[in-house]
Every structure is written in C-alpha cells, then in structure tokens.
Amino acid sequence: MKIYSGILWIASGILLLAMLTTAAMAEPAPAGNASGTENKESASPSADPRTLDDMFSLYQPYLKNISAYEPIYFLAGVDPSETRFQFSFRYRFLNPGIAIVDKYHWIQGFHLAYTQTSFWDLEGRSQPFKDSSYKPEVMFLTPNLLKKDFGSVQLFFQTGYQHESNGRGEDLSRSTNYLYCEPIFIFHSKKSNFGFQIAPRIWTYIGNDDDTNPDLKNYRGYVDLEIKAGKADNLVVEFHFRPAREGNSVRLDITYPLNHLFENLDLYFQVQYVNALAESLINYRQRNRAFRLGFAIVR
C-alpha cells in the first residue's frame, strides 16, 4: 500500500507544481520596439477573448512581469523519505515599455523573488514534511555587461538580499539572512546550441538566528560554485560545489527533455545526487546523501 500511496503522492505533487507555476511559466510579452515605446498590439490582450486563458490574461496585465527563477521540479527519492520538490518565480518591478525604463535601462533589473524548497517523507506513516525552506528575496540583475564584439560570450551580475526560514517555532525554528553577489558567465553557440555557464555565488550572513542555528556558516559556508553545461534542446548537466569549515557539499543534476521520447510532453526527466551538509535547515549539522528521480518544469 505504501508503494501505491507514494505513486499517488508523486502524481499529485507534479500536478500541484504545474498548477502553481502556470503563471510563472508564461512567456513575457515583447518589451517594445526599437524606440523603447511599448508595442500596444502585443502588450494588450485580445479584444474578443475566446478561451478561459484569454479572459484570464485580459484581467491580469501584469503577468508579463512574472517569470521562472530557480529550477522547478518534483523528485522522489530512491529512499522515499528523501523526496524533494521546489518551485520558484520572480516579479519584475517595472515594465520595460514605460518611459522611465526607456530613459534609465538599468532599473528594469530590480525584482522580487520567492523560492520554496520542501523535503517530504513519503515513507512515513502520514507522509509528513520533514522541513521546508521559504526564501523571499529582493534582487537586481544587470543586462549583458559585454559588448556585442564578444559574440557568444555573455556576462551578467546579480546581487540581492534573501531571507531563509523553515517557518517553524520554538526549538524547531531555523532562520538566517544573506547578502550575496553572483557573476554569471555564459558561453552559448548559436550554431550548435551548446552552452556553458559558470556562476559563483558569494554571500555573507546578516541577522542569523544565533539562538537556534548559531554555527550555520560552518556547515553551509560562504560560496556556492555552479557549473552548467549542455545543449538548450537536449541533455543539461548542472554541478554545485559548496565548501565549508565542517566539510564540502556537492549536488549533481542531470535533465533531459521528455518530448524527445514522447511527442508534446513538455517536461524534463531529472536525476539528482546530493552529498551535502545543511541541505535543509532543520538538521543542518547532519550530512545528507540522497539519490532522486523525477520531473522538472524549469531546469
């Protein structure tokens, strides 16, 4: 019965993620024409909506400011007690088509973002959540900082302030805050559709909860090195390395688009391996080793 219950929970989780991220996955509307003025024909919804989606968009003109942020996935652990899922989105403060953004292009880089990562014990009697991390943040992302002469090479810079909490009370409460910066170097070949990305995120702790997780920095460290490589329409491998005083942590994710195998199935098959300290906040001093399989909407 536990096996069938686990399968049911996995299917329900995938459906839930799809529902929660429908708005986040909507493609932003065109920002405007070459003069910087808004393209009214593309920015405004249909005057004669024919479907429920058309009607919804008619009353939600700000959806074009919402986009996916961190990866969105549902992964069942080979050990069902190690199941993990995540959804994430960001919201751009200002529409690129307005006059002030046309004059000061850099201000369109300000965003609000939210990421939630949950750890689910599908093997337990009541399938309880072991822990969740709720991560709201304010962030700024630059446009490409390199000139067009560099062709396939791009450089971006992201910085922000993020709060992380597990939303629990008393002895189970865990929380911290980060001020971070992250250069993002990308090489992408239009000819082969192959890309390579390296993005080291460096942070400092601000207002860490010294009552419940005073030594979190010794287990989570101060930097996360992300390396990602693959083809835009094919296999992508992502690797994270996080050094810390009490030990190093690694995470490996491999994703493959399932529409190569099943036409019109717009999901990625994902494999994840984790060998990490402080993967979640609740037992951050314990090393967690997990192998997970599942599906992703955003990788």
Image (tube, rainbow, N blue to C red):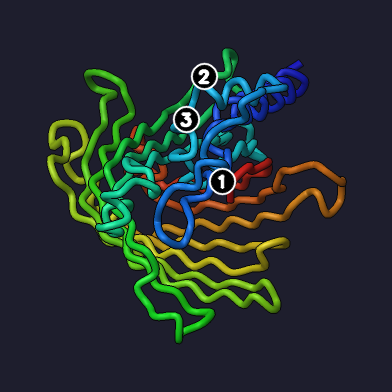
The quadrant where residue 222 appears: bottom left
Q: What percent of the width, then of the height, locates residue 289?
A: 52, 48
Task: Report the quarter where the N terminus lies.
Answer: top right
Q: Secondary structure at mark 1?
A: strand
Q: Is residue 89 visible?
A: no
Q: CA distance from mark 3 to mark 1?
A: 42 Å
- Give the residue type that dot 1 points to: Ala
- Residue at position x 72%, y 22% in the image: 50
Q: CA distance from mark 2 to mark 3?
A: 38 Å
Q: What percent of the width, then of the height, locates residue 212?
A: 20, 32
Q: Earlier in the sequence, mark 3 or mark 1?
A: 3
The residue beneath circle 2 is 128
Q: Earlier in the sequence, mark 2 or mark 3?
A: 3
The residue beneath circle 1 is 290
The residue beneath circle 3 is 61
Q: Is residue 59 visible?
A: yes
Answer few, some or many: residues within 10 Å of disc 2's Cα (few below 14, many 20 plus, some between 14 and 19): few
- Give the residue type that dot 2 points to: Pro
